Amino acid sequence: EIVLTQSPATLSLSPGERATLSCRASQSVSSYLAWYQQKPGQAPRLLIFDASNRATGIPARFSGSGSGTDFTLTISSLEPEDFALYYCQQRNNWPTFGQGTKVEIK
Amino acid sequence: EVQLVESGGGLVQPGGSLRLSCAASGFTFSSYAMHWVRQAPGKGLEYVSAITTNGGSTYYANSVKGRFTISRDNSKNTVYLQMGSLRTEDMAVYYCARDADSSGYPYWYFDLWGRGTLVTVSS
């Protein structure tokens, strides 16, 4: 099983700041990585797939990069609605998720 | 409206069974592989199972293999998860999710999720 490790566990930032979230895979997943956003009491929402492709309707402030074992989700300027939990997920092998990064208001 | 609505969760004793349903609407259900993902209280996401468009292929996490069965009824736009020999570690919110690709074969990303149904396993 491919283990995804996300860092940091919590990111404390202010609206308007840039957020950089990391996801590291225990072995190469090529570009087969997605990012999801989850808010309390809600289902996850697909943001990015295949490392860098924004899903339908996702604002341009969300971008993804990386390949192999190291991936990054960047939120260029945090909006109030972006404070949430973010998960990465790989599909190179049996799907697995990272443990999540919480983006909280500083 | 494009949506997935899960039902069937509840309290069950260890060793018991439960069947979850997920009703789809607003899209061509029969064109998409479907998935189940679960989230234990306060924990992260765990992938559970998948089924192809015609039900010909099914996939299971090792943790549920032999105990859970996924199926679908395209005439009812519904996917099911039959859960048996339930354990306390199966306690979670179970989400139904649509595959992100409409080719019929799993692409293994999930672009539409339901709100989930809670399964509690306790004596």
Image (cartoon, rainbow, N blue to C red):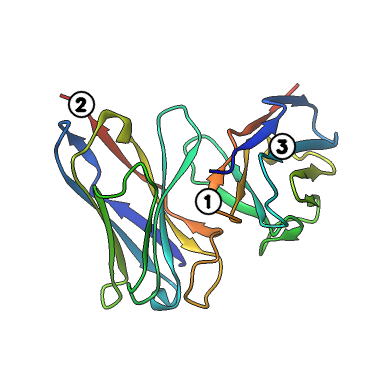
Q: Which residue is mark 2?
A: B122
Q: Where in the figure is residue A30, as x and y percent of width and height? A: 72, 56
Identify residue type, mark 1. Pro
Residue at the disc numbered 1:
A95
CA separation, marks 3 and 1? 30 Å
At which x and y percent is residue A28?
70, 49
Relative to the observer, which residue lies in front, A43 or A53?
Answer: A53
Query: Horizontal placement of B41 versus B68: left or right?
Result: right
Q: Chain of mark 2?
A: B
Q: Say which residue appears at 74% left-offset and 45% top-offset.
A: A69
- Residue placed at 67% from the left, 62% from the top? A57
Measured Cα–Cα span from mark 2 to mark 3: 39 Å
Determine the secondary structure under disc 2: loop
Q: A78 or B43, which lies in front? A: B43
Q: Residues within 10 Å of mark 3 (few under 14, many from 20)?
A: few
* Quadrant including the N terminus of chain B: bottom left
Q: Secondary structure at mark 1?
A: loop
Q: Position of residue B106 (x, y in %)?
A: 49, 67
In the rendered image, the vertical position of residue B81 relative to residue A15, given as above or below: below
- Which quadrant of the structure image shows residue A56? bottom right
The residue at the point 75 percent across, 37 percent down is: A22
The residue identified by callout 3 is A80
